[in-house]
Structures are given as C-alpha cells and as structure tokens.
Amino acid sequence: MPLTIAKTGETVMIRKISGKDEVRRFLARLGLVVDSQVTVVSRLGENLIIQVKDSRIALDRSLANRIMV
C-alpha cells in the first residue's frame, strides 16, 4: 500500500520506492530507503509530515504515493 494510506501515528516499514532514478535518489538523501521505518506524524491537506530517524519531513501526495509500505 502507498504511504498515503497509513494512519496518523502509525509506524510503517518502507518496502519499495517507485519512480525515476532522480526521485529515488532525492528520497534516499532524505533517509527514505527500503527497510527503513517511518512514522506519519500528521496530515496537512494533501501533504504528509513524516518522521524518519530524528528528522521530520513534509511530503506532497505525489511523492508519498511512490513510497510503498
């Protein structure tokens, strides 16, 4: 399922990241790689605030839909 389906407060494991190489490299630089855990902190409209390790990141819906958990 895509990350956008995860509920607020839920911690999930990234299973796959789809998209072009540039998108996957961008997400990897943010710490979003396969087998890492992320927590959905909150939702702001179409956007997600997630926590990866010790960082909080805002993702728009199109990027979050590329992350399968």
Image: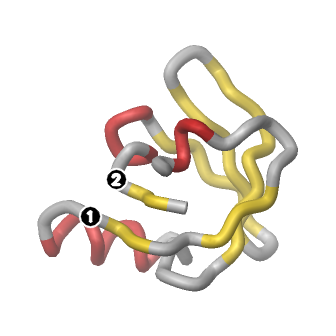
Q: Judge whether 21 appears above or below 35 on screen.
A: above
Q: Residue at x 68, y 50 (%)?
A: 50
Label count reads 2
Residue in the picture at 42% in, 33% down: 61
Q: Is residue 36 left or right of residue 24?
A: right
Q: Is residue 22 left or right of residue 58?
A: left
Please tell me in which quadrant of the rendered image residue 16 appears.
bottom left
Residue at 35% x, 68% y is 17
Do the numbered discs 2 and 1 sit on residues whose CB atoms are within 8 Å?
Answer: yes
Residue in the picture at 15% in, 74% down: 21
Residue 11 % position (x, y): 79, 59
Few, some or many residues within 10 Å of mark 1 (<14, 14–19, 20+): few
Instruction: Spot the residue most to the top.
Output: 45
Instruction: List the residue tagged with mark 1.
Output: 18
Q: Secondary structure at mark 2?
A: loop
Q: Is residue 45 left or right of residue 37?
A: left
Label 2 Cα neighbours within 10 Å, binned few <14 / some 14-19 / many ≥20: some
Most extreme residue toward the bottom, as rendered? 35
Residue at numbered disc 2: 66
Most foreground residue, 15 or 28: 15
Q: Any mark on residue 53, and which? A: none
Above-or-below relation of 49 to 22: above
Classify residue 29 by image quadrant: bottom left
N-terminal label among 2 and 1: 1
Is residue 52 or residue 3 the one in the foreground? 3
Name the residue type under label 1.
Ser
Q: Which color scheme is applied?
A: secondary structure
Query: Looking at the rendering, in which quadrant would you find the C terminus?
Result: bottom right
Whole-percent x and y of residue 25? 29, 77
Q: Residue type at mark 2?
A: Arg
The relative height of residue 21 versus residue 1 in the rendered view (above or below) is: below
Residue 12 occupies quadrant: bottom right
